[in-house]
Amino acid sequence: MKMRLWLRCISFVLLCCYGIQIGFAYKIPPVQLELKEEGFLVSIPHEDGITMAIYNIEINEQCPLLLDLITKPMNNRWTTKQVARKLQNNAKVKINLLIMHKEGIYSRTDSATLLNKNIILETIKEADKPMDPCIAAKPQLNADGVIKNSETKVFIDQKPSRRIFKPNELIFEELFKSPELPNWNRGNYLHSNAIGDRSEDFTAVRDDNSCMTVRGETLLITPVISKAGNKAFIELNNCKQPVCYENNNFTCAYVQQSKMPFAFPPPVNTSRIDTNGKFSFTYGRIEIYATLPYGDWLFPYMMLVPDNFNCTTRKQLRIAFATSVDIENNRIRGGPVILNGRPNNGKVYFVPTNHMATGMNFNANGYHNFTLVWTSTEIHMFADNKKYGCYINNDEYAEPYHIVLGVGAGGHFEFEDSRTKPWKNTLNGAFALFHRSFTGCCKNAIVKKECFQLKKKRTCSREWGSQAAMAVKYVRVYAV
């Protein structure tokens, strides 16, 4: 009961990873308790991969419990300061600790007894693999055994539907029989260093047949390396201004500016579609039968996004996600991602909070069924009907979301810096470095990692093949 109360008190999303096969290496070390003139400290050492620590402390089996959520380490330790409670001799302290780690969520429980200023520590319970707080949702029955109505809410043309749905009832289906895509929005967007929005990838989104077609009842979205250099003038017809663009002088054109020598036009042309304003829902099961795009620095947009766009807290529910690096390592990922805006010298820069679960031993070749089940209490992710992760939903995701499909490239969030990566995250010249890794002496690179042009070394990216396209056979949404 106390554990349930603890989890309810903390409003965040819990991760559990399992299903496809995952190896675990992290283990929480024993806690350290230090006495101070005012209160006491409890801590563990920092280790790469830890993103959050939650302490639940009970003194002498009495309430109230001491709760603390720590989001960053101090002096290389994850420390909770309890200055309001001074421990007396013979005090017994029970310490429950929950660690959010890139491998999952780990827990341990220790006890400490204070005897004549000596601290005697004892381990009660330690877990060497992530917790599994999720239980598969089952249909709720009335007293007569009839399935209750679902909790799914549907919005058509921005108006709530009055229909009452049953669990597993089909509420949206797209089979891509028409090139016009009447259920979707198609548009042009210009993302550029000249705009300065580092929450986006390195693409210009274009509504044209070179990047998006419907053929054989299949949607094909194909990214293409731009042929434009930094001196080019680029203009998109019917271009949409970014929702949260900070400059009133926005245009649908890229023009080189002497005051911004680092500026470079988007190095990749791609396409993206969404159902915003046409169809959205709160709670449901969405299934997408598709291939994943594969090519250096590519990734899919296969996600749900809130209808009410928040400029500084941008939420996503990723139905399936795998960068080129993930695919090479047989990984599939999915789940919540939040981009938190941080003001900096008049601009907003974003820091991602990544709660995505990871499934291993996933072969990305061919078509797969990617499924996300979203309820008022849980979020589950599946690949080919194998569950690889789930989260507790504590009202964090409880509003209308619409569907987004597309292919992204590069960006400042999805790829960790490495020796073979042509650009560094947050670097002003990232667009140019990305583009040069595919052009000039790097053009047609298949195996080579670097080349020299005008005596300057370039890091090369491999030329994309036919697998760079994302193919989608169908999208279906069911009530839950």
Image: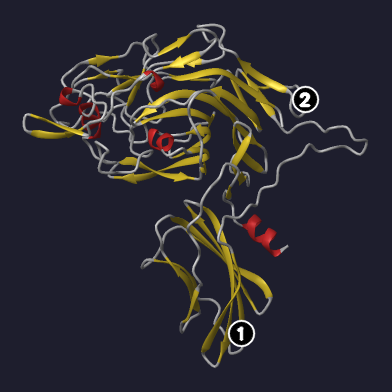
Relative horizontal placement of residue 18, taking residue 313 as reference (left or right): right
Q: Quick check: 241 above or below 58? A: above
Mark 2 = which residue?
A: 164
Q: Quick check: 464 above or below 61? A: above
Seen at 20% across and 20% down, the residue is 255
Residue closest to the far bottom? 116
Pick the quarter of the image with the N terminus: bottom right
Relative horizontal placement of residue 267, taking residue 242 as reference (left or right): left
Pick the quarter of the image with the C terminus: top right
Relative horizontal placement of residue 431, taking residue 146 as reference (left or right): left
- Residue 2: x percent and y percent? 70, 64
Of residues 291 and 400, the one drawn nearer to the viewer in this rendering:
291
Seen at 36% across and 10% down, the residue is 210
- Residue 135: x percent and y percent? 70, 46
Seen at 61% across and 88% down, the residue is 90
Mark 1 = which residue?
A: 91
**Number of other residues with Cα within 10 Å of mark 2, as a class: few under 14, some 14 to 19, many 20 or more:** few
- Residue 251: x percent and y percent? 29, 19
